[in-house]
Structures are given as structure tokens and as C-alpha cells.
């Protein structure tokens, strides 16, 4: 169902890096047709360097930390979206996301996770309840138990947020990382606070 | 006493000159070269394993005719799930929705929007139930329906939990071969 070839390729390899790589390769073939030995060698050398750099960057971003741009108003007091005429990736807050290798999650963390309804989207929400907790659903008097291996997530802006109130508890396997800092815009640089909901979650 | 002191002083100056004659610069650059080679190799392995193809060890009774009880090593490709083109009949590796530390191998039986009919309890009786698979989810079942914990217990699974598609068995040698559509 992908519309264009570049769409398919960028889906395949996850990101913008791959498009850069293809562009670089094309440029390289184009320039190398009539070049002397030395220039060709230099280009080959720089190509190798850039491939190494891309692999290094991908590893760092998969295993240690990465940056995301937050769009949408579901986390409103915590993250803001400006309406200025910036390029798209500068419209919202840019945040630093930490990857973790084991589930070191605690109540009140801001986490990113793959959407349970569309695996290509990634959501940012606040973690409300962990497996085994009893929780009172918002806007009702039902008390539910969070099933094993699942967690309950909600946006800070209750009025416009697509979260667990809509799709139920999500599997912990979908969680990708934890938001630790806001790094852009400059005047909003700060640590993201952990805010646990106390009054309607009964921890076990 | 003074002789001893003299000897110690001579030893110290000697040691200092020996110390300064060790080629620190070349040792350092050599060590840096080796370390960067190791880091590059680790990055290469990670990128290939995450974005192109990896291997997984699968065992247990749930996929019995297809995958051996004592365990087979299977090759897992990551491109198909990332593109979103997993089809009915593929064997996929996914994170268990009940335990995020566990990875399980199951066969995809229904995609989003499909209606799936299954035996509720295949050991006792043949009552069936039909469910619709919601958007963005898949229905997975083990090939050995008598001994498999799968979507019949925990319901449809979000697509995002799929880690890869197992397409071929690589070990043990007598089991080498592609994993087909049906067993």
C-alpha cells in the first residue's frame, strides 16, 4: 500500500539515513565516471566513513538515546506545539528519549510506545499503572486490574488525547523509550518530571 | 646508608629513562585502532540484526510439526514486518503480550479486519468461536493447537509486537530448509 518507491525504501530501513545513503551513492556514481585515481580514492574513503557513521548513529539511537519531535496536543502542559511557520520538525518540542534494556519503568514516567492500532506511529504518553495494579477508570466507577505484561497510559491533556481510555491497556513490549529532557526550544530546556497519579491507582 | 640511597636513586633514574623509552604514542594509537574496529563490528552486527536479518532459537511444543520440540535455530528477516506486509501463513517472532521479556514464535492466522474461527477447546469437544481482528492487530496461533498459548487465550496481538518473520531453519543440519506456508 506504499505509494512510491522512496516510501517503501524508507519504510524498510526505518529512516532518513537510508535516503541520505542512496543519495550519496548516486552522487558518487555520477561523479566517478571520469575522475582520476586520487579523487576516486578520496570519494571511496569518504563513502566508507559515512557508512560507518550511519551504522554508529543507528546503533546509538537504537540502544542508548535518541531525539524525537513531539507533535499534537495530547501532552499539552508538558510539551507544547507552536503554530509558527517553522519547518515541520521544529514545530513542537524536541525531546531526548532514553532507551532501556530492561523494564526499569515506574509510575508517572513519560514513555514513547508504538501505537497498538498502527505500528508505524509512535506515541508519547504518561505511564499511569503497571501490571498487577488496581485502577479506577477515569469518568467511571469501574475498578480494573491491569493484566500481566500490560500498562495503562494516558495523555496529560485529558480532553484531546488518544490513549488507554480508547484502546485499553497496552502490552509492555510496545514501549520503546522514556522521555528524559526537553532540549528545544532553548528557553524550555528542562528535565521532564515524573508525576505519578496517586488518587485512583492502587499499587500492589 | 648513602650507598643504598645512591642505588635507589640510580634505580629510579634508570626506571624513569626506561619508562620514557616505551613508545606510548604508537601503543595508544594501536589500542585506539583495535577498539574502534571492535566498536565498528558491534555496530555492523547490530544494524544487520535489527534492520535486515537475524537468527533466533525457538523451542517448545507449540509449533510442533514445523519447529522441533528440542529447539531449532531459525533465520529471521526484519524487512517484511517493518514494511507492514506480513501475510496469513507466515511464521513470525513476536514479543509475548503477557511477558515483555519473552519472545515467542507463532503462525499468523488472521490480519486486521479478518474474521477468524477457532476451536475453543480442541481437547474436549469441538465448539468453535468466530472473532473479528481489530485494526492494527494480528491473530496468531501455534501449529500444535493442543499445546500452545496464543491468541485463543490472550486475544489479538498488536502488530508492533512482531519482531521478524522466520523464513528458514538453519540448525540442526537434518532440519535445514525453508519454512513453508502450511505444514
Image (tube, coloured by chain):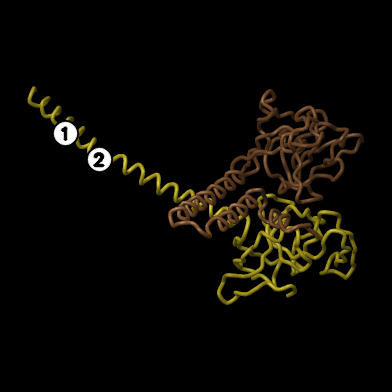
Chain colours: A brown, B yellow
Q: Residue sitting at 43 percent across and 47 percent down?
A: B35
For label 1, the residue is B14
Q: Is residue A56 above or below residue B2?
A: below
Protein chain holding label 2: B
Q: Quadrant of residue A203?
A: top right
Q: Quadrant of the N terminus of chain A?
A: bottom right
**In-front residue for pair A18/A154:** A18
Label 2: which residue?
A: B22
x and y, in percent, of residue B110 in the image: 82, 63
The structure residue drawn at horizontal position 65% and vertical position 51%, both measured from the top left corner, is A19
Q: Are marks 1 and 2 on the same chain?
A: yes
* Foreground pick, B90 / A40: A40
- Spot occupied by residue A78 in the image (x, y as percentages of width and height): 76, 28
Of the pair A166 and A152, the residue shown nearer to us: A166
In the rendered view, does A43 fall on the left or right side of B10? right
Q: Say which of marks 1 and 2 sits in front.
A: 2
- Residue B34: percent from the left, percent from the top? 40, 49
Quick one: quadrant of the C terminus of chain A?
A: top right
Tell me, yes or no, whether the two marked residues, 1 and 2, touch with CB atoms within 8 Å: no
Q: Residue at x 72, y 41 (%)?
A: A112
Under tag 1, what secondary structure? helix
Mark 1 → mark 2, Cα distance in angstroms? 13 Å
Residue that protrudes farthest toward the right in the picture: A140
Place of residue B72 in the rendered image (x, y in percent of width and height, measured from the top left) = 61, 68
Q: Dot 1, crowdedness within 10 Å: few (<14), some or many (≥20)?
A: few
Task: Rate crowding at label 2 as few (under 14), some (14 to 19) or many (20 or more) other CA atoms within 10 Å.
Answer: few
Q: Earlier in the sequence, mark 1 or mark 2?
A: 1
Instruction: For residue A148, say whether it is visible.
Output: no
Under circle 2, the secondary element is: loop
> What chain does badge 1 belong to?
B
Amino acid at each position: 500500500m506504499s505509494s512510491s518507491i522512496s516510501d517503501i525504501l524508507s519504510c524498510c530501513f526505518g529512516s532518513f539515513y537510508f535516503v541520505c545513503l542512496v543519495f550519496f551513492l548516486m552522487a558518487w556514481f555520477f561523479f566517478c565516471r571520469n575522475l582520476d585515481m586520487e579523487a576516486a580514492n578520496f570519494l571511496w574513503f569518504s563513502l566508507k566513513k559515512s557508512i560507518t557513521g550511519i551504522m554508529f548513529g543507528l546503533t546509538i539511537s537504537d540502544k542508548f538515546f535518541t531525539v524525537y519531535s513531539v507533535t499534537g496536543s495530547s501532552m499539552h502542559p508538558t510539551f507544547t506545539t507552536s503554530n509558527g511557520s517553522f519547518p515541520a520538525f521544529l514545530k513542537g518540542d524536541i525531546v531526548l528519549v532514553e532507551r532501556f534494556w530492561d523494564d526499569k519503568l515506574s509510575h508517572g514516567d513519560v514513555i514513547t510506545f508504538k501505537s497498538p492500532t498502527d505500528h508505524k506511529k509512535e506515541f508519547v504518553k504518561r505511564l499511569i499503572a503497571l501490571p498487577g495494579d488496581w485502577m479506577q477508570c477515569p469518568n467511571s466507577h469501574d475498578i480494573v486490574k491491569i493484566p500481566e505484561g500490560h500498562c495503562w497510559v494516558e495523555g496529560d491533556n485529558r480532553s484531546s488525547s488518544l490513549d488507554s481510555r480508547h484502546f485499553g491497556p497496552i502490552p509492555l513490549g510496545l514501549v520503546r523509550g522514556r522521555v528524559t529532557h526537553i532540549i528545544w526550544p532553548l528557553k524550555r530546556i528542562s528535565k521532564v518530571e515524573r508525576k505519578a497519579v496517586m488518587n485512583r491507582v492502587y499499587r500492589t | 646508608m648513602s650507598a643504598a640511597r645512591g642505588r635507589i636513586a640510580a634505580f629510579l633514574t634508570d626506571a624513569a629513562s626506561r619508562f620514557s623509552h616505551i613508545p606510548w604514542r604508537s601503543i595508544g594509537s594501536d589500542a585506539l585502532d583495535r577498539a574502534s574496529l571492535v566498536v565498528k563490528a558491534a555496530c555492523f552486527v547490530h544494524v544487520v540484526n535489527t534492520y535486515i536479518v537475524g537468527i533466533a532459537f525457538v523451542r517448545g511444543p507449540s509449533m510442533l510439526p514445523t519447529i522441533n520440540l528440542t529447539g531449532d535455530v531459525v533465520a529471521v528477516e526484519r524487512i517484511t514486518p517493518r514494511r507492514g506486509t506480513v501475510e496469513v501463513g507466515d511464521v513470525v517472532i513476536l514479543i509475548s503480550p503477557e511477558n515483555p521479556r519473552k519472545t515467542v514464535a507463532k503462525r499468523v492466522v488472521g490480519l486486521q479486519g479478518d474474521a477468524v474461527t477457532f476451536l475453543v477447546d480442541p481437547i474436549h469437544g469441538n465448539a468453535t468461536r468466530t472473532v473479528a481482528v481489530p485494526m492494527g492487530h494480528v491473530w496468531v496461533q501455534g501449529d500444535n493447537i493442543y499445546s500452545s498459548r496464543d491468541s485463543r487465550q490472550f486475544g489479538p496481538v498488536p502488530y508492533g509486537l512482531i519482531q521478524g518473520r522466520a523464513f528458514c531453519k538453519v540448525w540442526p543440519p537434518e532440519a535445514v530448509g525453508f519454512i513453508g506456508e502450511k505444514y
